[in-house]
Amino acid sequence: MKSARKPAAAKPSRRVLRPEGAAVINLPRLFLYHRGLEDSVREGITLLTSEELAGRVGRGISSAQVRKDLSRLGPLGRRGQGYNVVGLMRKLGRLLGLDRDWRIAIVGFGYLGHALAGFLEYREEKFHIGGIFDSDPSLVGTRWHGVRISHVDDMEKVLPALECSMGVVTVPPDAAQSVAERLTACGIGALLNFAPTKLKLPARVAVRTIDLASELSILTHHLRRGLRD
Amino acid sequence: MKSARKPAAAKPSRRVLRPEGAAVINLPRLFLYHRGLEDSVREGITLLTSEELAGRVGRGISSAQVRKDLSRLGPLGRRGQGYNVVGLMRKLGRLLGLDRDWRIAIVGFGYLGHALAGFLEYREEKFHIGGIFDSDPSLVGTRWHGVRISHVDDMEKVLPALECSMGVVTVPPDAAQSVAERLTACGIGALLNFAPTKLKLPARVAVRTIDLASELSILTHHLRRGLRD
DNA sequence: AAATGTGAAGAGGTTCACAGCG
DNA sequence: CGCTGTGAACCTCTTCACATTT
């Protein structure tokens, strides 16, 4: 199919994806930098070059990438010197929302829910479990490290008072959409979803889905071929 | 900084990233298509257009994207008609390694390990738990649904006989690198890592890391700003 | 001198629009 | 006709290389 197409008609760009010449920031990478800076602070390092930070973050990320990413946030480094570790970490922390605490509601308190609760409460000081919901009668009414476990049906009654801004959904796939909608209706603005479902939610809600089956399947493909990720 | 640079010196591309004009396939997306096709089969649909498949997979993916992705794998559709659901699913399944079963070793059998084991054994028919390792003496020697739980220290003795090709690492961050190296030494070729650690492994090993703290932090950023993901 | 910050080039991935074919 | 398959345009992201600043 050697299409020739309209050879050279003046075509003045029919669609403008980003009306403002908006900045493009890559959050996962900024988070990696933040973690690298945290480590540096722990080791007592106060100044880092883009090269050193790139090395810390690991393979794949170049010093040029680091500089490009950081320069978008303003002039953060000192030429000839490098970046002030503490100052930069603060700035990134603010941008990533890590300069304050967050309360999280967990819906679905099976093994995965337990795992996440433990992880958040003990490994991540910025995140706290604000509420737990499940439908298992033997769980409802009990407490997990002081946090009351409520019935999913009572979400509308209980959740608004808990001051949670994020929700984690670890319920079976067929319940995920309904749970997500109800969380949203209760004012939750961001969801971490572990159900292999494409959640349909209003645009104002931020959603991230972690799809374990998909991750595994990508690995199996790599096992087949000698491909790298 | 209005750099003018070397204005137009013929510069013949100094580095070749991909020596062969290699195809570029996006595995996560192919997996989504596969799932969409599975659903269609369940509903008894035998023919799908790129538009319909795109609609099933959800927002963000256009029919042009679907066609482009699929056409890379060969001529799979029928012009004027659409794609044969079963045939396409088979082809994608083969590519993704879903046409056979896989045995997985889980290292670290806390809540997260339990959650994954249950998920794999009961929700994903292609994946089976081949071995479980932990360092907790009260777990070692017991069985989980027939699978013996061995001590992590015995990995070299036990694992090779279990015929596992993939490993899941759910141990604490400081143990992850060592566990990953030992799994690799036992012949494991692909790892799913839940520790927030940059694993350094030989290039032949495929690694995917799921970083919960990073996911949450991206969500907090979205909560701050009104940005969408 | 050393390392940042940044236009410009390069590479990769996505969308367009139409040729090609059932 | 209708839908796939696809070259070309387009857009985004990364890398280069150097002007700039401390």
Image (tube, coloured by chain):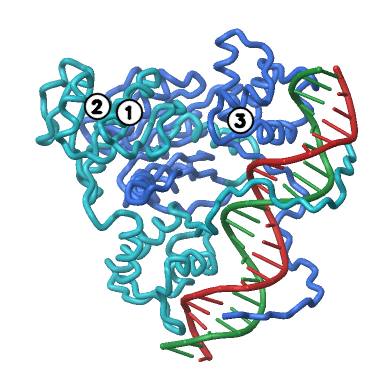
Chain colours: A blue, B cyan, C green, D red
Residue type at tag 1: Thr
Residue type at tag 3: Leu
Tell me, yes or no, whether the two marked residues, 3 and 1, touch with CB atoms within 8 Å.
no
Q: Whole-Å distance between the Cαs marked 3 and 1?
A: 25 Å
* A159 over A174 or under it: above or below: above
Residue with the mark numbered 1: B170
Q: Is residue B184 left or right of residue A124?
A: left
Residue with the mark numbered 3: A96
The image quadrant of residue C18 is bottom right
The residue that appears at 45% across and 67% down in the rendered structure is B70
Quadrant in the picture for the C terminus of chain A: top left
At label 1, counting other C-alpha atoms closer than 10 Å, the crowd grade (few under 14, some 14-19, many 20 or more) is many
Q: Are marks 3 and 1 on the same chain?
A: no
Q: Is residue A102 visible?
A: yes
Q: Whole-Å distance between the Cαs marked 3 and 2?
A: 31 Å
Residue with the mark numbered 2: B109
- Which chain does tag 1 point to? B
